[in-house]
Amino acid sequence: MSTTTPPLLDAAATQARLPMAQLCRQLAQAAAELAAGHIHCPERQALPLPEGGTLLSMPASAADIAIHKLVNVCPQNTGQGLATIHGVVGVYDAVSGVPQLLLDGPTVTARRTAAVSLLAIQTLLPAELRHVALVGTGKQARAHAAALAECYPGLRVDIHSRSTDSAASTCRQLASLPLQLTPKVGRIDDGAEVVILLTTSRSPLYDQPARAGRLLIGTGAFRPEMAELGPTSIAGSQLFCDDVPGARHEAGDLIQAGVDWAQVHSLADALAGRLDPAAPKLFKSVGSAAWDLAAARCALAAIRQEQEA
């Protein structure tokens, strides 16, 4: 691999090197390293861009590699037929600083976010997974559907939207996936063992009483003024978060519910078995550069395997 001009992987090439099973394993390792202080990732920086855009800078370092995710989020692009998010993840050797790889930033974000949800399901759901409700029809919802199809082929997945047309359209877009897709509007089906919310709603979309055997995952709301999960669901659940320090500033659901942060447990806690088996579980995902570092490790391992084949 060149030490001066690292290969740039486009979206398709990046996705091909982030298989879900391997990515989940890398995330579990990264969560343990982050909790032990072996991965360093400061709070992400956000700089304003014109017309409501934001430039996000997210670095992380470990003993083997360092990464820097630099992405631009420009909401006004939707009216121009452009993607909302653009950017790259730079991957570097931690000792020499030599560039190793450039990955497509939006693809890394979508894949590692979906993988965090899958890792939460594998860790926090005691029952066999048969039925999932996805609330939302955007890129993250599609990424989660693809991730579920990869790890749980044949799974029933309900696609929830505010309109029947939107839910049905998303199901048609995902029709090639090996899933039992059902468009839905309104109340979540009682049989869904997992509910994953993937919107930017400013008011709760789900506030049913927490119940054992149903895992709630909030992924979409990432600002203090946003909330997908309501206080009733939150108050009755044992709370977990992928990045507790980040959630204190970004997890609008938990902030608005006034949670006791001493009672919010990390992903590393869940992986270590520090949980109440009988309690309903709620997992809040806000993202971390440590998860981008895990994705970079996954991609590098895949490339090494290709070179050795």
Image: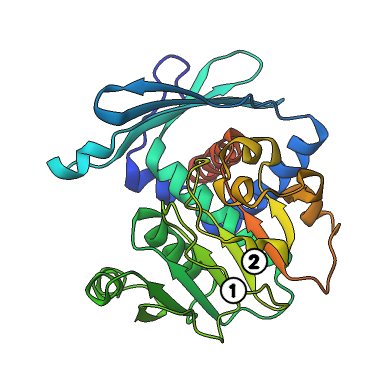
Above or below for 17 versus 169: above
* Vertical comparison of 156 with 106: above or below: below
SS at circle 1:
loop
Q: Where, by quadrant of the figure, is residue 297 drawn?
A: top right
Q: Callout 1, which amino acid?
A: Gln
Q: Quadrant of residue 215?
A: bottom right
* In the displayed structure image, the side of residue 70 where residue 230 appears, left or right: right
Q: Residue at x 73, y 57 (%)?
A: 239
Residue drawn at x 74%, y 36% is 34
- Residue 8 occupies quadrant: top left
**Crowd class of label 2 (few under 14; some 14 to 19; many from 20; radius 10 Å):** some
Crowding near the residue tagged with mark 1, few <14, some 14–19, many ≥20 C-alpha atoms within 10 Å: some
Residue highlighted by disc 2: 232
Residue sitting at 82 percent across and 45 percent down? 262
The answer to whether residue 153 is left or right of residue 237 is left
Three-letter amino acid code of the residue under disc 2: Thr
